[in-house]
Amino acid sequence: MPSAESNALLSPELMARLERLELVTRKVFRGHLKGERRSNRKGESVEFADYRSYVPGDDLRFIDWNLYARLDRLYLKLFQEEEDLHFYCLIDASPSMSFGNPTKLQCAKKLAAALGFVGLCRSDRVVIDTLGGIKSSAPMRGRAQLWRILEQLEQIEANDPTHMLDGVKRFSLRNSGKGIIVLITDLMDKTGYEAALRMLIAKQMDLFVIHMLSPEELDPTLLGDLRLIDSEDRDETEITVSRAVLKKYRQTLDQFVSQAKQFCARRSITYMLTPSDRAVDVIVTQYLRERGLVQ
Amino acid sequence: MSFISTLPWWAWLFFALIPPAIIALYFLKLRRAPLVVPSTYLWMRTIEDLHVNSLWQRLQNNVLLYLQLLVVALLFLALLRPGCRSESQLGQRSILLIDHSASMSATDESPNRLTVAKQKALKLVDAMASTDVAMVISFSDRAEVRQGFTSDRRQLRTAIESITETNRITDIREAVQAAAGLANPGRTSEIDNVNDIQVAEALPADLYVFSDGGFGGLEDFDLGNLSAKYIAIGQAEPTNIGIVALTATRNPEREEEIEVYGRLVNHSSSDKSVTTELYMDDVLIDATKTTLKPDQEAGVNFQLRGVEAGKLTLRVQEKDDLIVDNEAYTTITPTSKVEVLLVTDGNRALELALATPQAQKLARLTIVAPKYLDSPDFTKANNENKFDLIVFDNVSPKTMPFSNTLFLGASPAGDAWSFGEKQSPVMIVDTEKDHPLMRYLEMNAVQIFEGSALKSPEGATRLLESNIGTIIASAPRGPFLDVVCSFGLTRKENDSQVANTDWLVRRSFPIFLLNALEVLGNTDAESTARSILPGESIALKVGQRFNEVEVIDPKGNSAIATRGSMSQIVYPQTDNKGIYDVVAKDSDEALERFSVNLFSPRETQIKPLAEIGFGEEKVAAAPAQAPSRFEFWRWLTAIAVGLLTIEWIVYLRRIFV
């Protein structure tokens, strides 16, 4: 049964709204099972696609007998194949995600639950994973698997010290399928995020980066002589925060976000910056809709 | 520019460690509040331009460090006491004596001497070091401590600026004694005083005298720890013609004739021909022209007829450097006789001597027996101050009367006077002929049968000395004067009065009584009001029935004078020259008139002295400025403090990391 946190992750009202949505990809991938979305592959469905000449060995059930009667030649009816979609939600569970109110991780979990639910509703293969990896990250399909997703999400805690590149490497090795990947992260990796994103692009994935920052990162209110301790590597930075320094920080942040946006845009990665205190339904139904992840 | 090291070498060594210590402290970490943040990634990128680890780069752009080092450098420099030659500066302890007597009103300096003296004193105060202290004393005929020792230049300036001109004469002694008391504690500053022992630590001080030197009285003064500097105020050749005396004398033969006599003096370097005008009640009645050579005195004489009473003003029409002595005032009072009471059991010789024609012109004599002293009539007359003089012949009153007295062979009431044992014979040794009572007397041949030595009160004047001691003396008693003759004119022998002296038959006896009438009867032939110097107190001669009188000064301002603890009414506010009217407070009854004149040859002689003497020591006039050292250390310290403030502001504003 879903726990209280699960309820908090996904409210019934939100579920009701999400049921009407589906995940959209700009690319078409081959799924393993028949799903609820049309494939450009021809297959078995009720939707006519084309004709082709019969060749021996073809399934006789798909011969258009009416056409044979008229033309005296055998043609086979082709139908649109309906396939399932791989949807990966990769969450950055590093300690830096534990900041904010609600925490960035909590917001990421809600977002993953919402998107996963949308995927499950459309019989997509949904995989929830973290950069450091979780115990059972097997693909789930079908609405009934929602509780498992929620259970998985519950287990995620912000104590994963894995660097982004290592996490992406591990993820790529474990998951060979193609599809949509949504990376929810704060991009605060001192080794850089660029190599990790490049690796995901190389997998021909439809990549969405949701850049999640807490309000105190977006608009810090620090002042005075401080010894800043990095939550991830415990690195210490001594700083005297003045209004001038705060102004410079905001410039640096704008530059950082701008660089990330530019990097993503050049590589057809969909980038979205969101504060952690923004409501998930707004993110999904408004912002992600605008960016074409759901419709 | 020169330096004076204020610290020993080891202290400099210690201070030399301060700059490295500041730099070392700079690299020590501040005690900063720890704060866990999601990531320091962005913060590091924010401060990477400033947060550099290179020593040199760390030192660069650090205003706080530079300011601190600059402050230390300035303080070091201040400790070296840099300085340069300056023109004027006071010593560590200075006493500024500023003369504001009448002569300092002279206009040979522009606008006048006092203003110039004050300006010079202010210059000295401005040049004071912050650790120096000074005090300000003004002096004329009295000294006034305007400001005690202080280093507050504002207070000193205020004290100096508050000094105003006066019409008074100059007496520096009180002022230098006040100054000497501070520099030589416990000392009288008298030369050859063997008991003069210094009881407290001496405080040497510089004594600056801003004056024209018109004073004396310092012949027996010892400066001790005082270092005197005399700043002469005034031009070397001033021009001044002044009136130094004015009297109006009624002709004894013809009372309607009055002779006015004035004395002029020319203290200029050239001959002066001046017009002297005489005004009566502000109306010009006579004038005369006088020519005076330099430093020459001359008299001017006017004869007035048919004048009963009035105010006389003598004016010199000359624009000189000191105008305050160009006018003199006096009054002519109606003739009046002295009321004399003779208390005697009968003394024919005395009565005859007081009945001479000359004495009758002066006095109205009343002869009473001793028992009259106990009567209510006497008490009433005494309270009304009816008698100017009471002569007690072998009679002592129970209480002293409110009038002048002459005791012959009797002791005054009270313990002030006493007689010794009677001795015989009495040989006269010396007569004080300079005293107005004893003038024209030839006493050496006078024989006295018996007499007693007089024990007179303090302040008494010995008038006649004999082989047994003083036998005639006078002493003031409040506003009154008592003259006591210890030998009687007569003595009792076998129940009869016999002559005790042959003085009765000598010419000197009626002359003595005539002198007594003139001196003790408050009358003389001049018939003029008393004249005092500006600023002097005057004991008003009003009856005992008045406890308060109104005094109207020459400017028309009135003031109430009240009888003090003594039996007299003393009026001290006599700074304005002119004629003062004393009237009864309620009835406007005219009681007395006196004049205030600057009859002071010393003040009239306004040429500044080249040197002044303090005992044996002569102090020559010197400029107020003395070569001295102007130090910069306080400016350096002030800049250092300013820099510290800027550093504090920079730190608080957190402009830089």
Image: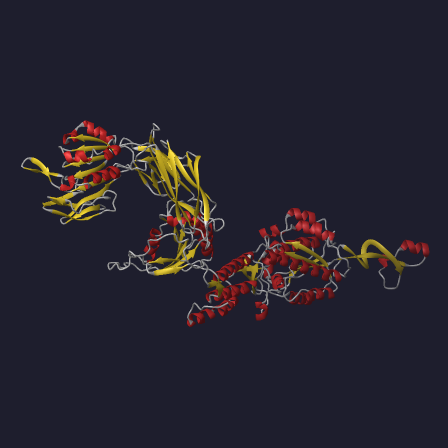
Q: Is residue B322 left or right of residue A118?
A: left
x, y (%) of residue B140?
Answer: 38, 48
x, y (%) of residue A145?
Answer: 66, 55
Q: Most extreme residue toward the right, as rendered? A: A71
How is the model colour-coded? secondary structure
Closer to the camera in the image, A280 or A77:
A280
x, y (%) of residue B423?
Answer: 10, 46
In the rendered image, the vertical position of residue B516 relative to residue A127, given as above or below: above
Q: Is residue B226 left or right of residue B446?
A: right
Q: Is residue B520 left or right of residue B256?
A: left
Q: Say which quadrant the C terminus of chain B sits in.
A: bottom right
Q: Is residue B425 visible?
A: yes
In the rendered image, the vertical position of residue B265 relative to residue B16, given as above or below: above
Closer to the camera in the image, B507 or B478:
B507
In the rendered image, the vertical position of residue B583 relative to residue B107, given as above or below: above
Q: Is residue B566 visible?
A: no
Quarter of the image holding residue B327?
Answer: top left
- Numbered marks: total: 0
Closer to the camera in the image, B260 or B223:
B260
x, y (%) of residue A131?
Answer: 64, 63
Which residue is rendered at x = 30% and y = 34% of the image? B253
